[in-house]
Image (spheres, rainbow, N blue to C red):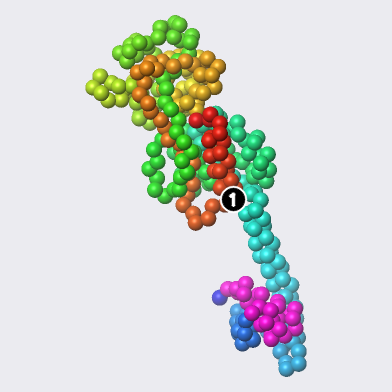
Amino acid sequence: MKITLEELRAWVVVIDTGSITAAAEQLNQTSSGISRALSRLENKLQTTLLHRTTRRLALTEEGQIFLEYARQILSSVETAEEQIAQRREIPSGRLRINAATPFMLQVIVPLVAEFSARYPLIQLELNTDDVVIDLLEQQTDIAIRIGELRDSTIHARALGSSKLRLLASPAYLEKYGKPESVADLANHRLIGFTQPDKHNLWPLWGSEGELLHIKPDVSASSGETIRQLAVYGEGIARMSDFLSRQDRENGRLVPVLEELTREMHHPIHAVYYRNTTLSTRITCFLDFLSEQIATKPLL
């Protein structure tokens, strides 16, 4: 049977106060309760720690040795409790964040300096994956997920949504001409995803009133690779605003079939596993990211 902290605390307070009665008063317990705790402790250790007489208490040699260890254990527990309390007030520790490469590079990385200045005791660990990961398996605190959520084992905070557009570089359009209709896309190079295939549904109406499903002439698994291909004039691509914002502002990419494009957005969530209490470092990052997205054109 294992020794409890309550038994250790009763034992140390008895020694420090010099009597069971005084220890009971300090710990707000009964004298009989303290006495039973000492008896349980000695039974578990199978040794006598204390000689008790009507006049005084005297430590045995084993009791003297055990007292030092008991003090160390209680001190360590108190220190741990203080550290946790401080972390609640001053967020600190390692925070592991996972996101698809484009979102990490275009949205999170530009915010790192400001976040670190605000919370200098939090050490960020930024990991990228272009597929949905298992948060527990990858030891991830927060993951950014783009698109509809289907995992019921997680909590999620909605961050907003990002509009989908068709884009190409001015150089590409100068060389191949600008499409004027959906049918014109058959004469153009289309850039799409290797997987999942649902990302190759474009916000255009097909011939039968459905979303246009393209067959890419060149494909990639990463949105960032697709962005680079479009910037280098390899074809027309479908991209989220958060990924293409700087390229559109700098003229490296321009809209294609803008008047025919259906209004479509990708929802974006920060997800984390269900828990009754979130650590303050997770909460403060979620609050910070929501604040930045609300005040800046990030998505």
Asked whether 113 falls inside the magenta stretch, the response is no
Say if 36 sits above or below 250 in the image. below
Q: Quadrant of the N terminus?
A: bottom right
Question: Tag 1's secondary structure?
Answer: helix
* 253 or 10, nearer to the observer: 253
Say if 139 sits above or below 223 in the image. below
Q: Within the image, what quadrant is residue 22 found in?
A: bottom right
Is residue 156 visible in the rendered image? The answer is yes
Residue at the (45%, 48%) spot, across then down: 155
Where's residue 223, x and y in %?
Answer: 47, 26
* 78 or 292, nearer to the observer: 292
Horizontally, residue 179 falls left or right of residue 53, namely left
Where's residue 231, x and y in %?
Answer: 50, 16
Secondary structure mostly taken by the magenta-highlighted segment of the chain: helix
Residue at the (47%, 15%) spot, across then down: 254
Horizontally, residue 7 falls left or right of residue 137, namely right
Q: Within the image, what quadrant is residue 194 found in?
A: top left
Where's residue 288, x and y in %?
Answer: 58, 41
Residue at the (27%, 25%) spot, across then down: 210
How packed mark 1 is, by other alpha carbons closer than 10 Å (few <14, some 14-19, many 20 or more), is some
Under mark 1, the amino acid is Thr
Is residue 38 visible in the rendered image? The answer is no
Q: Within the image, what quadrant is residue 211 found in?
A: top left
Asked whether 27 falls inside the magenta stretch, the response is yes
* 192 or 167, nearer to the observer: 167
The residue indicated by pointer 1 is 280
Where's residue 140, x and y in %?
Answer: 53, 45
- Given the current orientation, which residue lies at the most extreme bottom position? 54
Residue at the (65%, 75%) spot, across then down: 8
Please give the range of residues in magenta. Answer: 2-28
Count of numbered circles in the view: 1
* 197 or 180, nearer to the observer: 180
